[in-house]
């Protein structure tokens, strides 16, 4: 049984990874007939790395950024988001979504500010709506910023930051994204900034999860990439079995987020069950193999 360490995970060919993702973005946008991409800029590592890759694939003139803060967004995140947009030379729009959220709150008869998750999830869903408005208006695709760690443990909002057209860094674990950011030239303050969706005051991803991403990534690598059982993963990673099982429960319990809506079969060919169209008529299938 292989010994799985963080060093194994981050020791990948970042030049190949960057070129592969850049080619994928370029092919997707070309084949979709879009004029470019729209991306939400949070000032964090995931959106910053994705923005860098979009510009390398499409050119700065074809990428639009949206900075969409709320009162829970720290000023340094806003400044870092602006720094990324200006460093890349992309057009960006700054829209404080506070008044939009206030309108939602006033219109919801059962709204409860004390329900942090339900209230917090309004923010990424408002942001998704704005991203798609700009995408529709400007003939762009929406580029998502979720990484493999977040996707596997379901640490994102369904039809919020999960509502996108492509996920360029979706096959990279969080720790790999950080080192790809370093490879692309991101400053350390952004590449290694603690991750947080900032849905409520003081929220951090690792604080809410109760485990560091370094540990999450090692465990996921064992469970998903090596297809180990939790017991095998605990032995291979040296992590406590109860921690491995907790991570695995998150993967299992969030499977609904990674699937399209379920359709009951009542006909000969049912969408999503036994009838699937090719990914693309031109060349995108090479990136799915």
Image: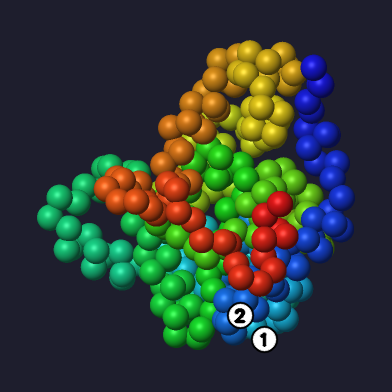
In the rendered view, tell whether residue 217 sits above or below residue 187.
above
Q: Secondary structure at mark 2?
A: loop
Give the residue drawn at x 62%, y 19%.
229
Please identify the residue farthest to the front as the structure is shown. Answer: 268
Estimate the x, y position of residue 212 in percent, counting from the top left.
63, 33
Give the residue drawn at x 52%, y 23%.
246
Give the residue drawn at x 62%, y 45%.
148
- Residue matched to label 1: 61
In the rendered view, tell whether residue 109 sits above or below residue 19.
above
Query: In the rendered view of the protein, which quadrant contains the N terminus?
Result: top right
Q: Residues within 10 Å of mark 2 (few under 14, many from 20)?
A: many
Q: Secondary structure at mark 1?
A: helix
Q: Residues within 10 Å of mark 1 (few under 14, many from 20)?
A: some
Estimate the x, y position of residue 27 in percent, counting from the top left.
69, 72
Give the residue drawn at x 37%, y 65%.
126
- Colour logic: rainbow
Determine if residue 208 is in view: yes
Which of the 4 image quadrants contains residue 183?
A: bottom right
Q: Earlier in the sequence, mark 1 or mark 2?
A: 2
Report the Cα–Cα distance between label 1 and label 2: 8 Å
Please identify the residue farthest to the left as the structure is shown. Answer: 109
Q: Which mark is residue 196?
A: none
Q: Is residue 92 left or right of residue 179?
A: left
Mark 1 touches mark 2? (CB < 8 Å) = yes
Label count reads 2
Estimate the x, y position of residue 174 in percent, counting from the top left.
67, 45
Q: Nearer the viewer, mark 1 or mark 2?
A: 2
Q: Is residue 2 left or right of residue 200?
A: right
Q: Nearer the viewer, residue 70 or 253?
A: 253
Estimate the x, y position of residue 237 in percent, counting from the top left.
73, 21
Q: Which mark is residue 36?
A: 2
Determine if residue 84 is in view: no
């Amino acid at each position: 049984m292989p010994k799985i360490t963080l060093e194994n995970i981050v020791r990948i060919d970042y030049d190949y990874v960057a070129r592969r993702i850049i080619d994928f973005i370029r092919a997707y946008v070309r084949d979709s007939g879009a004029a470019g991409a729209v991306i939400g800029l949070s000032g964090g590592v995931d959106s910053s790395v994705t923005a860098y890759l979009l510009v390398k694939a499409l050119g700065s003139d074809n990428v639009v950024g949206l900075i969409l803060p709320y009162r829970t967004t720290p000023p340094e995140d806003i400044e870092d988001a602006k720094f990324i947009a200006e460093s890349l030379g992309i057009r960006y729009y700054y829209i404080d979504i506070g008044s939009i959220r206030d309108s939602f709150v006033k219109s919801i008869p059962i709204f409860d500010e004390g329900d942090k998750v339900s209230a917090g999830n309004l923010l990424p869903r408002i942001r998704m709506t704005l991203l798609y408005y700009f995408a529709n208006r400007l003939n762009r695709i929406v580029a998502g910023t979720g990484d493999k760690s977040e996707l596997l443990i379901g640490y994102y909002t369904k039809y919020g930051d999960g509502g996108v057209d492509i996920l360029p860094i979706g096959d990279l674990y969080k720790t790999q994204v950080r080192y790809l950011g370093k490879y692309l030239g991101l400053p350390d303050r952004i590449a290694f900034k603690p991750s947080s969706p900032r849905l409520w005051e003081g929220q951090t991803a690792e604080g809410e999860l109760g485990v560091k991403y370094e540990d999450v990534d090692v465990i996921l690598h064992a469970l998903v990439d090596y297809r180990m059982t939790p017991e095998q993963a605990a032995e291979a990673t040296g992590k406590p079995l109860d921690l491995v099982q907790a991570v695995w429960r998150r993967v299992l319990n969030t499977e609904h987020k990674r699937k399209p809506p379920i359709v009951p079969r009542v006909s000969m060919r049912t969408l999503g069950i036994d009838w699937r169209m090719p990914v693309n008529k031109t060349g995108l299938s090479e990136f799915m193999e």
